[in-house]
Amino acid sequence: MSNHPLILVLNCGSSSLKGAVLDVVSGKVLLSCVAEKLGFADAFITFKADGDKHKVALGGDHSHTVAVEALMAELKVHHLHHKIAAVGHRVVHGGERFTHSTLIDDQVMRDIEACIVLAPLHNPAHILGIRAAQAVFADLPHVAVFDTAFHQTMPEQAYRYAVPTELYTQYGVRRYGMHGTSYRFVAQETARFLGRAETELALVIAHLGNGASITAVLNGQSRDTSMGLTPLEGLVMGTRSGDIDPSIFSFLQENANLDMAEITAMLNHKSGLLGLSDLSNDCRTLEEAAANGHKGALLALEVFAYRLAKYVAAMTVANGRLDALVFTGGIGENSTFVREKVLSHLAVLGLSIDHDANLAACFGRAGIISQPGKTPLALVIPTNEELMIAQDTAQLAGLSI
Ligand code: AMP
């Protein structure tokens, strides 16, 4: 085992906690865990290390703190606890306050709290997780890495909505974007893969997972992105509608007797691939069903790919030119079907597909999937948000690696 300092990366939800211990130099995950049902009597945590997986019930008050204490106990079993040098926390929303990752102090905690209004489901859970980790790993530096920070370079013409100015100045109603940590990692990796400088590349990166978004990255900086005030805007996603006519709210209130909360829940949890297919939010399931003649599944994938292709064109406008379209995330990295469909709409931008290369760039393998000699390039670059968080954490904690 290496003697490099290790970073613990934590990602807390309201009833969950995901953790990973990484060697920042090799990128290797030495131990990972997922705690579920936190706050409930049947809370448990699952650990994975050295190819072994086991589940432990979480007693006490079943809280995030109990989960972090169980993680500490497991680290001791593996003799890893004394090698952890810093803790990195994923934080979804940093508003306009955070343009970079930062060491956590009392003021940073107050600022993360101030962003709760923008991410009422996520930021309170992150605060719980940070406090729990600070109690258990009291002597270590803690770092916050924000999903929104990378997009703070967007120009005002990209982040403002065409609504009365006071909605922005008083309530912070603007586009913030998400998945920033993934975009930063993938932009760096793309430059490395191509042997070029990030500062000379115009990239459009599509992060396609259960949540999906797309970003214009020019010279290493975000110029525009598809998610907005919340993650609901933009592409078709697993269960989210993405862009809709905002009048659908009043239309459904009047005609379907639904209230705001019901409509919001429907657009977030019952729409997207799931809503269109009436079958599943899972791309793999839909591909199989479409191959077996399920019309809804095929339609869902077609709408997904068509919306995405339109956004590739929009993001190309944001950059002013296009060197490469990059696919990442669970769907982007694995679905040869979706990539092929998206690229079939994009010959207009000069994009192309090499079918064999498309089949080869799967399951964690990076690759160029456009035809040899043709530009713009189309690529697959696997993302690694945990490694990006660990790298930021090591750097801000002043670790020499
Ligand atoms: P993520 O949220 O990044 O984990 O991505 C989840 C999505 O990736 C789900 O819709 C999965 O169906 C999709 N996915 C994972 N593996 C494959 C695959 N081999 N083919 C198609 N879709 C996949």
Image (cartoon, rainbow, N blue to C red):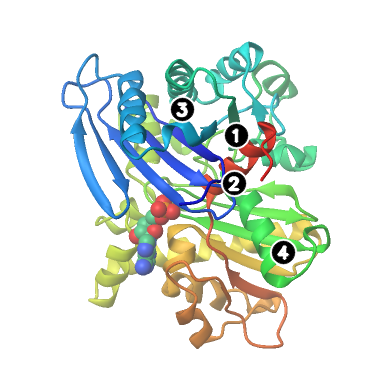
Asked if residue 238 is positioned above or below residue 203 in the image, the reply reads: above
Between marks 3 and 1, how big is the CA–CA gap?
Answer: 14 Å
The label nearer to you, 2 versus 3, is 2
Q: Which mark is residue 388?
A: 2
How far across and how far down the image is residue 376, in percent?
71, 75
Q: Is mark 3 within 8 Å of ligand 1?
A: no
Residue positioned 70% across, 65% down in the render:
192
Q: Tell me, yes or no, whether the two marked residues, 3 and 1, touch with CB atoms within 8 Å.
A: no
Q: Is residue 91 visible?
A: no
Q: Quadrant of residue 371?
A: bottom right
Q: Is residue 59 visible?
A: yes
| Three-letter code for the amino acid on which mark 2 is drawn | Met
Q: Which mark is residue 145?
A: 1
Q: Which residue is mark 3?
A: 122
Between marks 4 and 2, how big is the CA–CA gap?
Answer: 15 Å
Residue 185 as seen in the image, left or right of residue 281: right
The answer to which of marks 1 and 2 sits earlier in the sequence is 1
Q: Which residue is mark 4?
A: 191
| Three-letter code for the amino acid on which mark 4 is drawn | Ala
- Callout 2: SS: helix
The answer to which of marks 4 and 2 sits earlier in the sequence is 4
Q: Alpha-carbon neighbours of circle 3 within 10 Å: few (<14), some, or many (≥20)?
A: some
Q: Tell me, yes or no, whether the two marked residues, 1 and 4, touch with CB atoms within 8 Å.
A: no
The label nearer to you, 3 versus 1, is 1
Asked if residue 74 is positioned above or below residue 305 in the image, the reply reads: above
Q: Nearer the viewer, residue 292 or 373?
A: 373
Q: Nearer the viewer, residue 322 or 13?
A: 13
Residue 364 as seen in the image, left or right of residue 218: left
Residue positioned 46% across, 34% down in the render:
10
Q: Alpha-carbon neighbours of circle 2 within 10 Å: few (<14), some, or many (≥20)?
A: many
